[in-house]
Amino acid sequence: MKKKKTTRSQVSVECCALCRLSDDDPAVFGEKVTLKEHKLSVHYFCLLTSCGVYQRGEEDEGVFGFLVDDIKQEVRRSARLMCSGCKQKGACVGCNVRSCRRTVHFPCGRKRNFISQFTGLFPSYCPDHSPTQSLCGGLDLSLPQTCSVCLDPIDPFLCYSVLKCPSCHASWFHRDCVQRQAHSAGLFFFRCTLCSNKEIFQEEMLRMGIYIPERDASWELEANAYSELLEVYARCDALACLCNDGRTHSAKTGWFEVIRCRLCGSRGTHRKCSGLTLDARDWACSDCTQATDGRASLVSSPQGGQRRSLLSKRHLSPIHSSISSKRPALPVGSGSPEEILQALGPQLCPLSVQVEVDGDQALSAGVELVRRPDFDPTRTLSVRFKDDRLTAFPSSLWDSDTARQYFLKLLVQQIQDSVVFEGPDGSKNLALDSQALREDLYFDVGCLLALSLAHGGPPVGFFSRALYQCLFNHPANRPLCLTHMTPDTHFTRRVSRMAEAESVDELQEVMAESREFLELAGCKRPIVSLEEREALVEDLVGFTVITRMQLPLQRFRAGLQTLGVFDQVQLYPALFFHVFCSARLSAQTLAQIFSVLVSQQEDRRSRETPVCSFWRRFLLDCEGGRSSISLQDLLRFSTGGEELPAAGLLPSPSISFLHPVEGGGGGGERRRLRRRREELLRDEGLFPQSEPDSRRLLLPVSSSYEAFKSSMEQAVSHHMHLLLTAS
């Protein structure tokens, strides 16, 4: 019997269009997807690591967001490139170092010790430029070592095929073994098999080219693996059950169908017994209502709604992962936050993106911007306000720079008042909101704040000290205390009562009332002395502020990675503290941003020196309320801006001096009288002037502080009046 021939078209469909292999091993090549209508097959890892293709579609379009036309275009592009491994055409993976010209197929790269990082923009590195691990001093390498996954003997020498845990430094792995472990365990269960460290271990494995799938563990996805856990609770727990058939009776529909708690699922009620409507499906038991402060957000999962994938390769997206590759950081000095943020400027390109704002809805416009499929944070913002009545905004907003600054100011104000934050003005913590989690609003808000800082917006200024410490670990390794919790919340009141208990009996009474909260926090333990109270309160504060906020903090931190802002703040957290936590304009800040340009002539310089003292004293009077104008008025008069941008002002503001017109000569007493008369006239008629375009302020050379203060107040007040009239 003749063997049936396989046609060439069949072979081409079965083989990956990028690497030309038909292998189907998800742990090594990623999922293999075949689109029969397009006669196209491709490995997921080949797509992620290819240099010329990006996810421009939604997750359900093409192959996980990679459009078919883009994939075909990448096949055509790579057809001209020679693989340095197999010497065949079609190499689509290149070394991320610009000066390196090595290109390979993804499978050939694995054989040639290429490392592909499955994070950020998915860069790949050849053996000469790939990241490496280092040994920890004090390890006894003379002892026999085994792979912590397969338990086979392993030589304890770090290389491409041998990795170690960065946390305990005692767990060694074969690369293939730890990759298959990651593929099986998934994001939520992948950890060191010896020390069980998860966060540091996952970061290091990502850096060393291990792919961690964003899903539950394979054993959790097995059909009917935990079928006995699917038995539902069916008992009425109402105080007074009205059902004649008893508490365990549950009709299929109607008044006496048992409705389970939407939060814990371990309590139930008949509709009739709890006064629910006939079609009610949404009910929470009293225990969960108390434990969650009346909201479902504490235990609501964001997995239920659509959420942007954390493993997403988007074109030109500089939103970096916290796992950085071995590329040099930005050339930033440790001078000031303004200099550091200005150093991010070269990333911005001259191309602009249009932002249209309906009325004053800056936050809605910003969220719509960052959720666009082609969003590119490096583009300059071109803002246009739309107002049908044409009365809400001054005519000056038609100017592009002014409109952008006004938009960024509104944006920061509205972010502070959004559902993502809670607490008093100027000291906000992240709030836990289930809707915001489902919509991934925490990421969007973090991205918008980073955009605002990099594009010349105002300082953030409303973070609480606790939030800043949770994000940037500043002050370093300092435990949180009760004062860091958001005031006047259910949780804060409960913890405060425990902290204020004056006896063990009083403390135990409060703990009994808060039983559900303690169970949820994992802090339900016997307390026999007041000495144990401090540790209990510290644990509850840590749970409330950090543990239950892990996912919002993670997504918010990922958003702040935009344009590298988070990385720079993490390098210099002390410098950036006032940018995020206390952005109040002060006399000291305003004095520091102006450079004083004194005259070269000796007689002029001697008259300008006292004016410098007048200027500093006047700033203090404005700050202390001893002047008719405010520091904000003075800033607007001298620079034209309502807020001081976090990245500073360009060009840098300067101060020069206005001298009166010199009078003619004369002798003796007549000259002195003429000078005195000129001084009086000068004090009455000499006023400050500003040149906002060049950021130049001209101060009058006055004979006394009273005359200087009067001329400054008159000029600035007149300027503000003209601005109000124009608007």
Image (cartoon, grey):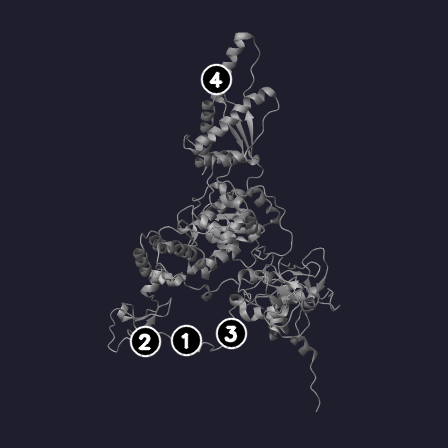
Amino acid type, label 2: Thr
Q: Could you classify mark 2 by the number of other residues whose Cα lies within 10 Å: few (under 14), some (14-19), or many (20 or more)?
A: few
* Mark toward the viewer: 4 or 1: 1
First-in-chain label (1 vs 2)? 1
Number of callouts: 4
Q: Which residue is mark 3?
A: 219
List the residue tagged with mark 1. Answer: 230
Q: Callout 2: helix, strand or loop? A: loop
The picture places residue 123, in percent across and down from the top left corner, at 64, 60
Residue type at tag 4: Leu
Mark 4 in CB contact with mark 2 (< 8 angstroms) = no
| CA separation in Å, label 4 and label 2 | 94 Å
Q: Residue 585 or 325: which is nearer the viewer? A: 325
**Residue drawn 40% across and 61% down?**
521
Q: Residue at x 68, y 56 (%)?
A: 97
* Marked residue nearer the N-terminal end (4 or 2): 2
Say which residue label 4 marks. 680
Q: Is residue 403 visible?
A: no
Q: Earlier in the sequence, mark 4 or mark 1?
A: 1
Whether tag 1 and tag 2 are in contact, CB under 8 A, the answer is no
Image x and y of residue 579, in percent: 50, 44
The answer to which of 298 and 44 lies nearer the viewer is 298
